[in-house]
Amino acid sequence: MVFHSSRGEFPTTRMRRLRQQAWTRSLACESSLAPSNLIWPLFVLPDEGCEEPIESLPGVFRRSADLLLPQIEQAIQLGIPAIALFPVTPPELKTEDGREAINPNNLVCTTVRKIRDRFADQIGIICDVALDPYTVHGHDGLLRDGQILNDETLEILQQQAIVQARAGCSVIAPSDMMDGRVARIRSSLDQEGFQKTLIMAYSAKYASAFYGPFRDAVGSKKNLAGGDKKTYQMSPANTDEAVHEAALDLREGADIVMVKPGMPYLDIVRRLRSELAVPTAVYQVSGEYAMICAAAERGWLDLDACMMESLLGFRRAGADMILTYFALEAAKTLQMR
Ligand code: PBG
């Protein structure tokens, strides 16, 4: 660490010297953002030819697989390395135990196969492991007598990971926050011959109010009926606990750790990156996206500038990769620069 007192003072030192021109600013630039840092979350509808806007996520659509393909093609052309798929499960397929999660022909699996058929390995496909798209109560695990069961949930999560890997998913992303899930998923993937399938663990996933628009998008909000996920997602007050969670996930076999949400948790991104020194992802969640869009719609913020600044902030905090609904727009902006 350089002692600032050993450096010159004004007028010898003038911080503005390096800020004078675009070229000096660019030489002194400490962090950067590229399309290769971005992961694009996509909402998937059943059937064909379906496209629906999401009211609380302006500019984001739910689309059937056939209509997603051209979108994914654009992402590939822009240099976005991976997408994350979230199925919008028809209500009639939701059950108490979320068993649709392990149906090898469920919406997410059939969609993965279609994407793989069309694009082979040109883009990474990330699939969430958690039961909330499939349960009538909207929780990520099995619910009994008002409790979310941990060990019983692991059984179904490991099967969910296997059906997704078999469909051609490249990265399994457990977002359920059950204890021990990464180890169980890793060993069952290995047993089934999927040693190369990556695990991106939602390690520091907070019980956040910023997920609201996402729950609208996948239709889990009314299932959850005002309930919360505080018995398994982390308290927004905690930071050491995030390091502990991420360290455990790494020991259990995670390749990438994630912090979620993003903007209110930049300190956590920085701690994981500095203290664990492993690939770190951050999720700019639905509520963060919605806030920026809503203010921009009112003319209170410049959408493009705030989008780019929020994403660069994640990189400065230490994130290697960013899941963001802005991925396509940001990649287009970067291409024009
Ligand atoms: C589900 C899941 C959630 C998000 C990603 N996976 C919601 C939740 O935990 O209720 C939120 C993403 C977002 O808000 O953009 N396990």
Image (tube, rainbow, N blue to C red):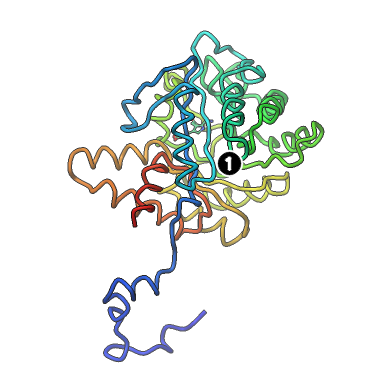
Q: Which residue is mark 1?
A: 122
Q: Position of residue 191 (x, y in %)?
A: 82, 33
Numbered disc 1: secondary structure: loop
Q: Residue furthest top?
A: 92
Task: Give above or below for 63 relative to 210.
Answer: above
Q: Position of residue 261 (x, y in %)?
A: 46, 43
Q: Who's the residue at 42% across and 25% down the image?
A: 62
Task: Give above or below for 4 relative to 179.
Answer: below
Q: Identify the image quadrant of residue 204.
A: top right
Q: Who's the residue at 40% across and 24% down the image?
A: 216
In this rendered view, identify the residue nearer to me: 286 or 125: 125
Q: Who's the residue at 48% across and 24% down the image?
A: 44
Task: Give above or below for 313 relative to 64.
Answer: below
> Label 1 neighbourhood size at 10 Å, few (<14), some (14-19), many (20+)?
some
Q: Residue furthest left?
A: 299
Q: Residue furthest right?
A: 191
Q: Position of residue 58 (x, y in %)?
A: 31, 32
Q: Amino acid at mark 1?
A: Gln
Q: Position of residue 286 (x, y in %)?
A: 40, 36
Ligand 1 lies under 8 Å from the Cβ of mark 1:
no
Count the labels in the image: 1
In this rendered view, identify the residue nearer to me: 298 or 104: 104
- Quadrant of the rendering where the C terminus is positioned: bottom left
In this rendered view, identify the residue nearer to me: 200 or 147: 200
Q: Determine whether, in the image, residue 307 is placed left or right of residue 319.
A: left
Q: Determine whether, in the image, residue 242 is placed left or right of residue 317.
A: right
Task: Give above or below for 213 relative to 186.
Answer: above
Q: Determine whether, in the image, residue 142 is placed left or right of residue 55.
A: right
